Amino acid sequence: MTFSPTQPLVFEPIFQERVWGGRRLESVFGKALPAGKSIGESWELVDRPEAQSVVRQGPLRGRTLHELWRDHRREIFGKNAPKAPRFPIFAKLLDAREKLSLQVHPPEEIAAVFGGEAKTEMWYLAEADPGAEIFFGLRRGTSRAQFEEALANGEAADLVHRIAGKKGDAFFVPSGRLHAIGPGNLVVEIQQNSDTTYRVFDWNRVGSDGKPRRLHLAEAMRSIDFDDFEPEIVRPRGELLVESPLFVVEKWELQEARPALDRNAAAVFVCLSGKVRMANIELRAGEFFLVPAAAQNALLEPLAKTASLLRVTLSVR
């Protein structure tokens, strides 16, 4: 199959209804949400057995992300792309109209015990209402016994470290870190390709079926890092936000045309504000696109005075 090596790949979003979701993806980013539903997540780049991103336009229109990973890995993702069976990154937008559950993602060794998948992720706050909170790690000095007692009394949230986030803040969430996203946050989430979440506490609410949502207390207590006290938000180092063994995330303020790639590897971009153009395709705030590794000379240019983007690449091992 032939395709343009300089054309960014744009995928159809997959919207997920959530009890804590809202309609902000529509009002802020212009997403065409299904009518009358509370949409908590927009899956923008996903290669899962239960969900597949599909190319929206161009010569590869209709092809799934998994097909590209399987059939065109070298051309699109680069000669050093990992031998993983699926694309290793799962990228989303989250609209937290209400609190998400207090939860944890398992480390590799615990995930294997319970038949789940490890998950490390990072959040970038695209919007945050005044006073909007992030629940992030444990309050200093909290012991496992104290947390178990508080959990039994419905007071677990009192022992969780809270941060008042603001637009532009970033948070790194390794597996094992207790966390929740508070109401009023609109989040870009870049994560390991996993869908394993262990709920610890769900604020005593019910799901769409009118019943309390399932908790995963045994799994969660095995997964929580009880030495993870009051972690800090990400402190940028120049353009670099996060450099982990899984992915690297940078923040670009694009004021003039710039090469999208700096090595023989693909990059995923998230347009945060403004509008950009690459290979005659225009991309606006809230859109994700994948620049193929073959597009080594492709330029990304702002169509306003400046445009803000996140750039995500796979870590080289």
Image (tube, grey):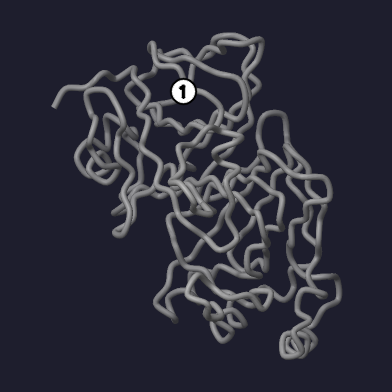
Q: Position of residue 188 (x, y in %)?
A: 58, 43
Q: Is residue 296 left or right of residue 30?
A: left
Q: Is residue 276 left or right of residue 201?
A: left
Classify 10 Å Cα crowding around label 1: few (below 14), some (14-19), many (20 and above).
many
At horizontal 46% and vertical 23% (from top left) the residue drawn is: 261
Q: Residue furthest right?
A: 141
At horizontal 77% and vertical 59% (from top left) the residue drawn is: 231
Q: Is residue 23 left or right of residue 267?
A: right
Q: Position of residue 142 (x, y in %)?
A: 82, 78
At horizontal 56% and vertical 63% (from top left) the residue drawn is: 19
Front-most of 32 and 127? 32
Depicted 19 relative to depicted 115: above or below? above
Give the number of marks: 1
Quadrant where the image shows the N terminus: top left
At horizontal 64% and vertical 57% (from top left) the residue drawn is: 173
Q: Secondary structure at mark 1?
A: loop
Front-most of 234 and 201? 201
Depicted 266 relative to depicted 275: above or below? below
Front-most of 197 and 240? 197
Residue 248 found in image quarter: top right
Residue 63 found in image quarter: top left
Depicted 21 relative to depicted 75: above or below? below
Q: What amino acid is labelled 1 in the image? A: Leu
Residue designated by label 1: 261
